[in-house]
Image (cartoon, grey):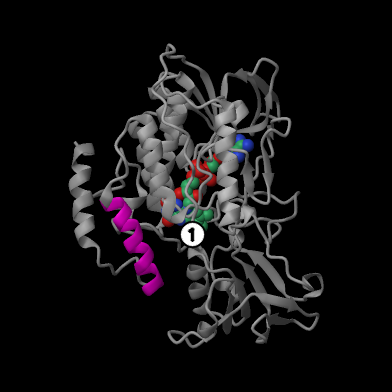
Amino acid sequence: MNIPKTPTVPFRFPSTTPITHRKVAVIGAGAAGLVAARELRSEGHSVVVFEREKQIGGTWIYNPNTESDPLGVEPTRNIIHSSLYASLRTNLSREVMGFREYPFVAVDKGDRDPRRFPGHREVLEYLNDFMGEFELGGLVRFGTEVKHVGLMEGGKWKVRSRKRSDGGEDDDEVYDAVVVVNGHYTEPRIAEIPGIDMWPGKQIHSHNYRVPDPFRDQIVVLIGSSSSAVDISVEIAGVAKEVHISSRTAMDEAFGKLHRYNNIHLHSVIESVQQDGTVVFRDESAVCGDMIVHCTGYKYHFPFLKTNDIVTVDDNRVGPLYKHIFPPVLAPLLSFVGLPWKVAPFPLVEFQSKWIAGSLSGRISLPTPEEMMKDVEAFYASLEASGIPKRYTHKMGNYQFEYNDWLAAECGCPPSEEWRKEMYHATSKNKKARPETYRDEWEDQHLVEQAQKDFQKFLS
Ligand code: FAD
């Protein structure tokens, strides 16, 4: 399957309009919200970051508790933001993963994790270091949830927020611009399975997976083949009786027991499930299962955002968005950071944030809304022509670096480093070849050395 290229409108010379400083609300203080705040402030904007948790970090705040509905579909459930499991180690090397201007290098302190693919706590520590280094803490309103963002007459934005601690008083404020950075790994997507309403076993989404203990001696069916699905299936197999993976992407010849394990079996997609517990796969194999784990991804969700339907989420396409960021008719006053997936998110959101900050000040000029809309339509047409489903609109994979470099050119900053591109691909290849050991065995040490040399200019 060919990944379509984002078509490009002609290059425009920088605007000659005077620099404008705006009052900007950033919603979310995860990795992307923090870097957005840094870029907006350094462009001279006045920034307030709303964060409903008591600390920064979003995804990287591990919470051992799970939601009241393990599938994560019940609207009244207690919502837990992070989807981390206890054993999670990064699936990107720290060199590739870190921000470009603040490398994720090992810190020589007793309690820090120096591994190249560290555990999740180390990422949270790094984000806290980032916040400290750029003195971003003072911009964040902690424990403050945004309840409503609405377009006002005249193009400004009403932002209604509520402090979680003080008895639910709403606070309304007006902002010139809003940057949405609320993350997209909290609202589970569930596979549709014929017969599932009558199936007697337990179901859970990976969002609510923390540790393998509840799967002890069980026959588990796990749907999906992402990085998390691989980690979780291997971890569960250590305690379960059998693990049966249902994969949409595996080749027919791979079906059957995996040779490296005595209790993991690979199957095609699920055809149906039955009242007696049987799970029937499309390859005609079947198993009587106790539990189904849905490692089936997440949905974009912006419950607070009211744009008079200018921006919608349709089959997981957030649109229309120019370059996955600006709704053409609202640009640059509404923007989204961090929507692309199957990417190295930190450097990508750093480029996106620079572009947004410069567009808001008028230092970088955007095409007209009509030109942006044409570009979006051409992009959607190219997806369709390549047979890529709508729900993969923001899936980037191989073309992320081309995208980053396009943003870099618009912002007038250096493109992605060659070593970072090569290292991203080397890790993908290594992960395929050694799914359980790629974090500890690699063949791209020469790239690590290039990265470390490159980092020297940021480490004084
Ligand atoms: P988040 O980190 O989700 O932050 C969003 C923030 O918005 C949260 O703090 C949340 O509390 C806040 N928020 C949401 N709604 C509101 C509201 N209404 N009002 C106020 N605040 C609000 N990336 C990597 O680079 N390497 C990895 O190895 C890696 N592994 C991952 C493993 C898993 C299981 C998952 C789920 C993701 C992984 N990622 C990884 C991707 C990861 O999500 C990104 O690295 C990054 O954390 C995304 O940052 P974000 O700021 O976009 O979103």
Q: Amino acid at mark 1?
A: Asn
Depth order, front residue of 278/225? 225
Depth order, front residue of 142/341? 341
Q: Secondary structure at mark 1?
A: loop
Where's residue 388, x and y in %?
A: 58, 57
Q: Is residue 156 above or below residue 233?
A: above
Where's residue 370, x and y in %?
A: 59, 29
Q: Is residue 324 above or below residue 438?
A: above
Q: Can I make out residue 111 in this image?
A: no
Crowd tier of the residue under label 1, counting other residues whose Cα lies within 10 Å: few below 14, some 14–19, many 20 or above = few
Residue sitting at x 52%, y 53%: 395
The number of numbered badges drawn on the structure is 1
Read off the magenta span: 419-436
Where's residue 304, x and y in %?
A: 68, 35
User: Circle 1 sits on which residue?
Assistant: 2
Residue sitting at x 28%, y 56%: 114
190 vs 420, left or right, is right
460 vs 395, left or right, is left
Say whether residue 428 is magenta. Answer: yes
Tell me where residue 412 sits by quadrant: top left
Q: Can I make out residue 448 in this image?
A: yes
